[in-house]
Amino acid sequence: MNAAAPTLPVVILISGRGSNLQAIVHAIANDRLPVDIRAVISNRPDAGGLQRAAQAGITTAVIDHSLYPDRAAFDAALQECIEGFQPALVVLAGFMRILTAGFVHHYQGRMLNIHPSLLPDFPGLHPHQRALEAGCKEHGASIHFVTEAVDGGPVVLQARVPVQPHDTVTTLAARVLEQEHRLYPLAIRWFAEQRLRLDNSGHAVLDDRVLTGPVIVTQETEVSF
Ligand code: GRF
């Protein structure tokens, strides 16, 4: 990558261990992602990802949702915190809060999420368990632009993995997570390179073409992260 390439200011929101955050940090360190993580913000003070961020020298902040009377008050505080870092992209990486319409609208076309299922299948909680219960032969992860519908925005990129006969939630989640770590840096890189955007009609556009479905990555696909 050209060392002089402009970098995209990004804020990453987390709620937990932060392995996707770590994958993004690695991609930047390997000079594969022209991104400046301005801050990592967690809604939980005990999120493991905060330590990972601090170790990487990234500014961290906590907006503890339990201290706010309702979603609107929490989202207003979160937005104010984010705005202090002036990001061009907000990255939800295991951020486990439903966001209000006003917040989502403010970041329309500038906010990505990762969800561990082949959306539109299994939005919301416990996707691995539900995929196993449904007897799916394939499962995976999706990157999408965030819209008001929970896990419902246009899907940009998807990784598919086979479901094995003896899979448990743990083994399946681990197989999917490995792919998540390849997907997110790739989608963010597309956005940073201005190859990926959301158009005015709410469609994801990659390389000037409206995506009629997500770009698919399998375990065999070469992804340079
Ligand atoms: C990931 O599976 C992500 O897709 C989901 O929550 C999990 C977060 O993992 N939304 P981590 O905090 O990035 O390790």
Image (cartoon, rainbow, N blue to C red):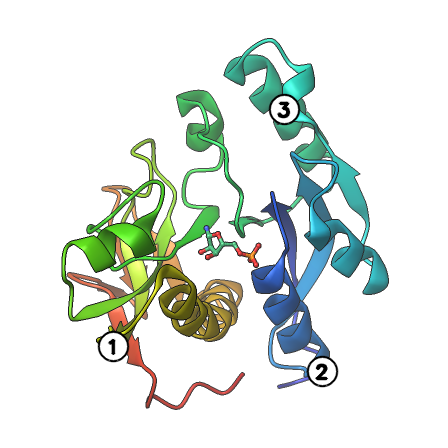
Is 141 displayed left or right of 85 in the figure? left
What separation in Å lies between label 2 and label 3 (alpha carbons)?
Answer: 39 Å
Q: Nearer the viewer, mark 2 or mark 3?
A: 3
**Could you tell me which residue is drawn at 21 percent across and 75 percent down?**
165
Q: Nearer the viewer, mark 1 or mark 3?
A: 1
Q: Mark 1 Cα within 10 Å, few/some/many (few <14, many 20+)?
A: few
Residue type indicated by callout 2: Ala
| Location of mark 3 (residue) | 65
Q: Label 3 near label 2: C-beta < 8 Å?
A: no
**Could you tell me which residue is drawn at 64 percent across and 46 percent down?**
87
Q: Mark 3 Cα within 10 Å, few/some/many (few <14, many 20+)?
A: some
- Check residue 3 in the rendering and tell me which mark sits there, or answer none: 2
What separation in Å lies between label 1 and label 3 (alpha carbons)?
Answer: 38 Å
**Quadrant of the rendered image containing residue 183:** bottom left
Can residue 119 be seen?
no
Q: Label 1 near label 2: C-beta < 8 Å?
A: no
Instruction: Report x, y in % for residue 172.
Output: 36, 68
Helix, strand or loop for disc 2 = loop
Instruction: Report x, y in % for residue 24.
Output: 61, 67
Helix, strand or loop for disc 1 = loop
